[in-house]
Image (cartoon, rainbow, N blue to C red):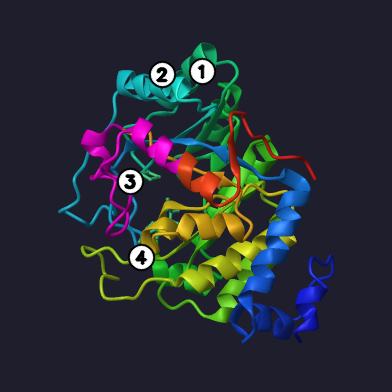
Amino acid sequence: MTDLIDSLPTDRDLSDDEWRFLIEGDYDRQRLYDKADKVRRQHYGTDVYIRGLIEISSFCKNDCLYCGIRRSNAKAGRYRLSREEIYACCAQGYELGFRTFVLQGGEDSYHTTEWVAGIVSSIKERYPDCAVTLSLGERPREDYEIWHKAGADRYLLRHETASRPHYQKLHPPEQTFEHRMECLYHLKQIGYQTGAGFMVGSPFQETKELIADMRFLREFQPHMVGIGPFIPHHDTPFSDCSSGTLEQTLTMVALTRLILPQALIPATTALGTIHPQGRELGLKAGANVVMPNLSPVAVRGQYSLYDNKICTGEEAAECIGCMKRRVAAAGYRITIDRGDVKLF
Ligand code: 5AD
Ligand code: FES
């Protein structure tokens, strides 16, 4: 089986046994990471794209069992940024060299379709050279269409797990796997650069679920894939569960690079949270995006999806400075560029 690593990347669909070996087998992971890094360099060189993350609301009507801002968490701090606060984050981000703004938030019913559309078009008007990415959860197809017309370029909606029974163990019954998937297909059809993704080491996850994730990515062909370890949050039903591991997460990042050579894959904040060098190691295992936080420091701590989240105390300028040093030390280079996907 070890020559399987030599044969990567491959266009053929791997068997269950082959996937199982790649995901949990006993072999030198560095060889896998190096393969992924090589493929990434073929398409993107040493370029690392930066996205300015603006966490616009910590209100959420959903109740994902793993997430710290789930509606049942009465202890979660709740805030909502005003239009003006969002524009101020963008202005600061633009000065710092960001050419993509990611508006992310809980599923907040206060955000009407028109409110979001107005913000998107205003950002695009002020910064025609920038991309706007939305990450606002599941909405009717119509909303996605209106936001796309308003100028939104990309949308991030992690599928969380490609296994229906597993999805239902992580979510209450009213949040269905079918609806999540439907949203993803709508986004892609509408013409968004679409991001999927999943947590590694989430409760009840086994290797077969990770195999399903790999097969889903191969079929869906997302432009972006966010992969991070599950990390427990103390005020959720999964507070006693253990985090996903560094090795397991890096393995999934590398395998994702090998099946989607051109994808944009972030070295996630969650990866940086479970290990001091997590994001750097993510870059060396195939990731090519980092998403420093542009949210006002005063609210950062309240966007608490999991415990011990890093970068919550740093001003945007400090965070991007720190990130530049880290990326350079890992042997890559941050680029000021919208960083669109290089189409397959
Ligand atoms: N650990 C790791 N990632 C989490 N997310 C939410 N809660 C957690 C957690 N406890 C991730 C989900 C979501 C993204 C915004 O954050 O994958 O899609
Ligand atoms: Fe945010 Fe280091 S990357 S403080």
Residue 175 visible at all? no
Of tags 3 and 1, the one toward the viewer is 3
Instruction: Quadrant for residue 210, please give it.
Output: bottom right
Q: CA distance from mark 3 to mark 1?
A: 29 Å
Percent of width and height locating residue 327: 52, 46
Label 1 vs 2, first from the N-terminus: 2
Compared across the picture, whether 74 is left or right of 253 comes to left
Q: Earlier in the sequence, mark 3 or mark 1?
A: 1
Taking the spot 84% from the left edge, 70% from the top edge, the residue there is 12
Q: Which mark is residue 121?
A: 1
* Residue drawn at x 28%, y 51% as measured from the top left: 304
Q: Secondary structure at mark 2?
A: helix
Establish whether ligand 2 lies closer than 8 Å to the Cβ of label 2.
no
Nearer the observer, 283 or 299: 283
Task: Identify which amino acid the numbered label 1 is placed on.
Answer: Ser
- As drawn, the label of residue 231 is 4
- Please state the horizontal and vertical placement of residue 8, each as a whole percent of the image: 79, 69
Is disc 3's CB within 8 Å of ligand 2? yes
